[in-house]
């Protein structure tokens, strides 16, 4: 046993002694994802602890103090400056200490634990017409503790300022375990036995302020967004010695915050959004002072690269409502009366038009359009990280701020500085507050590139100080800017910062390397030169292949939220970081690095991290940088089990297209056998759960009758691909689809006997998948350029994406270009004026995740609304079955937990509405959830069928 192993064992033993039952995780499989946040840094911790109470935190601090081990507090892990990674013990507050303890409506305050996600607080306070003012773009996953740590602001900081302005009291722990409450009256102990220690601490702070009155008064609090350093001006006599506000923004370096009392604001009654177009971001910045005269709640800016990337990732229709231009401002106005707000917006638009810098402007009336536009801005960090041209950009200088009236001049100088270093930056940010976010194409993999980055950052610091600004406007200094604080502050101020930390943390155990005695800004960088990894998938969109693909994850953590979109179902079900898209991507990055995860493709830690991934592909669409975990998992499983015995379900479910074809020749006796005791035994032997009924196989006779009936009367305009699931389990869909398509003016020729290879892909049997796909491509690429319509969304997605990426041939790409889902065919190819049979007014819809992710702008919900269905109640998110996943015995519970998130609640309150589910997995899960109730999912083709209940189409 090594010394490090013995030390870790001793530490965990002491923690267990002080807090029996406290969850402590060690080893690369548990700590790997916590080596990263959303910054450029990688610092592997020794252990991750998940406290449930403040007493648990006391126990950890006591054990770490005795062992001399550092402690880093962490919330959502979205820090962009390296504030939430550390070499010792990481405290994850988001997992359990995430309770809203009290909401006082009359006082307009809330008391919350540090791990409460901002959106959870906002949802709770909205019931009372209240809100928490600061709203960073990560509001769906950042925690209040994290916001307090870096004094977060957000899009509406023009109105609401910084988090420090909304904090009434903090419940803290010092490094030596003293519990106290900090507020505008100073510091008071929680335990009377700590009164002496608290008195000495407060006395030391008052003495520190008295000795540094001049630098505190002249160097701090100069501009609204001056977050860099410590906010000691809140301790000045004229500011009432407000210790709570002074501790906000200390990034966990002085005390551990376990809970907070925060002030709430009233929700605006009326809102209007203006979108303004410009030729250039500097032109936009020039207009900011004039805009501020109209008292906006938000003034946000971004350049064209972010918009182009969003449109490429989620479809052209994902960004609407922007006027012509190459840079834009969002200006939000609020008030008590809508007519008054609208009048102010019209007046502002007129004033700006007269100034002559606008290329266009409009008032956005539609709430849905506003939400879509705000999503573009909120996903800015991720969208800018991996642009439409494949270029990568990074934080490091993403957070500088100046006074708003100096913004245009600063941006001119900043762009000249970028050009002088041959760097490119993607600009966006809180222009109304003078805060500019930018991601830059630093090369951190080489020594030369790191030296260029270091020189640039030093010159950028000098530039922003020259303009009277601050290194950080909301993200904090962290590891990215701590070293540069000496450019901004005097030696005396730097010494005062160190003395402030020393009062709370004399041994320097809390988040070391940040702000005080900072680590070099180019130390512990995550990027380095890595060897190319030989893979079966081509990863054509990533310059470094698989290594570049998994590097797409930059830690913004959108997969940890449930604020719109479909990802990440397993994280939503378990709440575990390792079950998020980000956690899995970080484990794959660790595998590629080969340091903590040393056995590469054979790694059991990586296999375990990927185990609960449902391969839903939602991340490929919802993740701002386009992480495609389903593909990464398929590649890993292929490599992991190469030449080895596989899990039993890989054989029983992976080879389903072959076995189901055979079962169709004797469907009746096979179905009878599977419904009896022998069927349950076979299920167990095949690794299949016995909690589900195995779907009944359709007979080949029924399929043949359906195919004969589906032949078009005249020339066909498209090919109807009969996939393995439809062929084996619901051939009636072939008949319904052919009739609907013919009715819509798209007569199709059914094509049977082919397979997309999906089940072999999802189980990582890529050699077999390629053979199956190659045969299918050869059959379809026969000179025919007619659309290929696929009724099963998962098979359509496999033909569209997996086939060309796995085969990499021109023929595969030609076939992929022809593929349409049933919805897509009706959306794009139906004759003008086509109307379906009468439809119900309201339906419940389960959109297949693969269709959602792969066929952008061609979703069943949109089509149903266009066809006249007034109420489409979409169960947004995965059904939980997800192909083979929910049939595997070890995944049944997770499958049902995912179903509980959105689908099951809708089925429990159907009120007679029909249920639409094109995916066979979704329909099977709905049948299972029905539990004997008269609920059957219809394929969209069955809903639209002009001649339903045709003979000869039963199983």
Image (tube, rainbow, N blue to C red):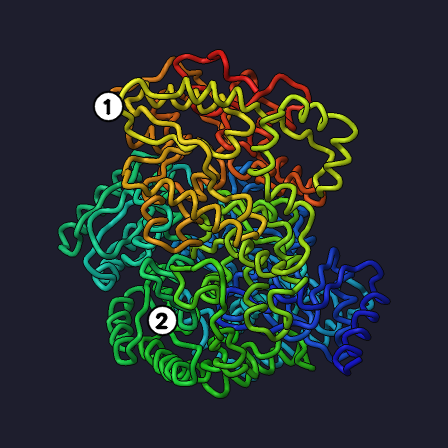
Q: SS class of the residue under badge 1?
A: loop
Q: Are marks 2 and 1 in contact (CB under 8 Å)?
A: no
Q: In which quarter of the view is residue 912 placed?
A: top right
Q: Nearer the viewer, residue 511 or 766?
A: 766
Residue 698: tell me if it is visible: yes
Residue 558 left/right relative to 934: left
Q: SS class of the residue under badge 2?
A: loop
Instruction: Identify residue for label 1.
Output: 832
Residue at 36%, 71% (x, y): give it: 441
How far from the left and from the top, in percent, is residue 778? 38, 45
Q: Nearer the viewer, residue 932 or 102?
A: 932
Q: Nearer the viewer, residue 825 or 897?
A: 825
Instruction: Identify residue for label 2.
Output: 441
Residue at 49%, 54% (x, y): give it: 138
Label 1 Cα crowd, 10 Å radius (few <14 / some 14-19 / many 20+): few
Q: Earlier in the sequence, mark 2 or mark 1?
A: 2
Q: In which quarter of the view is residue 363 placed?
A: top left
Residue at 47%, 51% (x, y): give it: 770
Residue at 65%, 65% (x, y): give it: 603
Q: Nearer the viewer, residue 508 or 707?
A: 707
Label 2 or label 1, whichever lies nearer to me, is: 1
Residue 350 left/right relative to 736: left
Quarter of the image where the N terminus is located? bottom right
How far from the left and from the top, in percent, is residue 171? 68, 60
Residue 757 left/right relative to 342: right
How far from the left and from the top, in percent, is residue 583? 58, 59
How far from the left and from the top, in percent, is residue 276? 24, 50
């Amino acid at each position: 046993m090594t010394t490090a192993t013995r030390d870790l064992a001793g530490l965990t033993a002491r923690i267990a002694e002080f807090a029996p039952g406290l969850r402590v995780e060690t080893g690369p499989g548990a700590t790997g994802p916590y080596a990263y946040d959303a910054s450029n840094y990688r610092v592997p911790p020794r252990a991750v602890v998940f406290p449930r109470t403040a007493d648990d935190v006391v126990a950890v601090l006591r054990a770490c103090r005795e062992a001399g081990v550092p402690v880093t507090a962490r919330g959502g892990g979205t820090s962009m400056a390296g504030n939430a990674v550390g070499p010792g013990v990481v405290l994850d507050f988001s997992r359990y200490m995430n309770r809203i303890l009290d909401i006082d409506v009359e006082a307009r305050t809330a008391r919350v634990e540090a791990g409460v996600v901002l959106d959870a607080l906002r949802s709770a306070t909205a019931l009372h017409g209240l809100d928490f003012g600061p709203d960073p773009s990560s509001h769906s996953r950042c925690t209040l503790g994290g916001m307090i740590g870096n004094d977060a602001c957000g899009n509406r900081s023009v109105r609401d300022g910084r988090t420090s302005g909304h904090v009434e009291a903090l419940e803290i722990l010092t490094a030596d375990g003293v519990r106290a409450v900090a507020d505008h009256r100073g510091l008071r102990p929680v335990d009377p036995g700590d009164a002496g220690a608290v008195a000495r601490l407060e006395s030391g702070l008052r003495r520190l302020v008295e000795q540094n009155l001049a630098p505190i008064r002249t160097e701090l609090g100069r501009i609204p967004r001056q977050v860099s350093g410590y906010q000691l001006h809140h301790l000045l006599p004229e500011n009432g010695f407000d210790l709570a506000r002074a501790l906000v923004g200390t990034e966990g370096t002085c005390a551990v915050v376990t809970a907070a009392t925060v002030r709430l604001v009233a929700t605006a009654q009326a809102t209007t959004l203006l979108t303004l177009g410009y030729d250039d971001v500097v032109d936009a910045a020039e207009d900011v002072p004039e805009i501020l005269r109209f008292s906006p709640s938000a003034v946000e800016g971004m350049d064209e690269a972010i918009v182009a990337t969003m449109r490429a990732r989620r479809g052209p229709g994902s960004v609407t409502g922007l006027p012509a231009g190459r840079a834009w401002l969002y200006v939000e106005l609020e008030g008590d009366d809508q007519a008054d707000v609208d009048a102010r917006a019209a007046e502002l638009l007129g004033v700006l038009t007269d100034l002559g810098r606008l290329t266009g402007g409009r008032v956005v009336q539609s709430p849905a359009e506003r939400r879509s536009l705000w999503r573009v801005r909120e996903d800015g960090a991720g969208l800018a990280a991996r642009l439409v041209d494949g270029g990568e950009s990074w934080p490091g200088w993403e957070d500088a701020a100046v006074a708003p009236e100096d913004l245009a001049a600063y941006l001119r100088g900043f762009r000249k500085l970028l050009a002088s270093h041959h760097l490119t930056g993607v600009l966006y940010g809180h222009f109304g507050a003078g805060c500019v976010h930018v991601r830059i194409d630093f090369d951190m993999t080489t020594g030369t590139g790191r030296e260029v980055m270091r020189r640039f950052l030093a010159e950028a610091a000098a530039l922003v100080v020259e303009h009277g600004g601050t290194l950080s406007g909301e993200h904090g200094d962290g590891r990215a800017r701590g070293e540069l604080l000496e450019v901004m502050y005097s030696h005396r101020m730097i010494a005062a910062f160190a003395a402030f930390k020393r009062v709370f943390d004399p041994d320097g155990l809390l988040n070391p390397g940040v702000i005080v005695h900072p680590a070099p800004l180019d130390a512990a960088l995550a990027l380095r030169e890595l060897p190319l990894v030989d893979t079966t998938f081509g990863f054509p969109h990533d310059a470094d292949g698989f290594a570049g693909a998994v590097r797409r994850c930059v830690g913004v953590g959108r997969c940890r939220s449930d604020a719109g979109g479909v990802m990440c179902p397993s994280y939503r079900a378990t709440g575990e970081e390792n079950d998020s898209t980000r956690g899995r991507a970080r484990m794959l990055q660790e595998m590629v690095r080969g340091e903590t995860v040393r056995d590469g493709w054979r790694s059991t830690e990586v296999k375990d991290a990927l185990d609960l991934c449902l391969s839903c592909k939602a991340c490929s669409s919802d993740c701002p940088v386009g992480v495609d975990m389903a593909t990464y998992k398929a590649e890993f499983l292929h490599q992991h089990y190469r030449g080895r015995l596989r899990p039993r379900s890989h054989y029983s479910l992976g080879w389903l297209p072959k076995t189901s074809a055979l079962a169709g020749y004797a469907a009746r006796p096979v179905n009878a056998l599977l419904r009896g005791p022998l069927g349950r035994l076979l299920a167990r032997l095949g690794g299949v759960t016995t909690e589900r009924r195995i779907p009944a196989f359709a007979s080949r006779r029924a399929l043949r009758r359906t195919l004969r009936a589906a032949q078009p009367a005249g020339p066909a305009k498209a090919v109807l691909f009969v996939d393995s699931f439809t062929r084996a389990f619901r051939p009636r869909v072939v008949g319904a689809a052919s009739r609907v398509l013919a009715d819509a003016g798209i007569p199709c020729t059914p094509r049977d006997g082919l397979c997309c290879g999906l089940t072999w892909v999802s189980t990582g049997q890529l050699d077999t998948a390629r053979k199956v796909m190659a045969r299918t491509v050869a059959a379809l690429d026969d000179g025919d350029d007619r659309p290929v319509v696929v009724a099963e969304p998962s098979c359509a997605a496999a033909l569209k994406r997996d086939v060309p990426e796995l085969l990499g041939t021109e023929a595969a790409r030609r076939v992929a270009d022809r593929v349409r889902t049933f919805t897509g065919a009706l959306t794009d190819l139906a004759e003008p004026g086509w109307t379906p049979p009468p439809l119900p007014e309201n339906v419940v819809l389960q959109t297949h995740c693969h269709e959602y992710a792969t066929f952008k702008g061609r979703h069943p919900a949109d089509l149903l609304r266009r066809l006249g269905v007034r109420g489409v109640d979409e169960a947004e998110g995965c059904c939980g079955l997800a192909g083979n996943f929910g049939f595997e015995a070890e995944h049944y519970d997770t499958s049902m937990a995912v179903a509980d998130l959105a689908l099951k609640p809708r089925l429990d309150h159907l009120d007679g509405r029909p249920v639409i589910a094109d995916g066979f997995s979704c329909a099977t899960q709905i049948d299972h959830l029905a539990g004997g109730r008269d609920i059957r999912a219809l394929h969209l083709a069955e809903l639209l069928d002009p001649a339903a209940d045709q003979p000869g189409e039963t199983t």
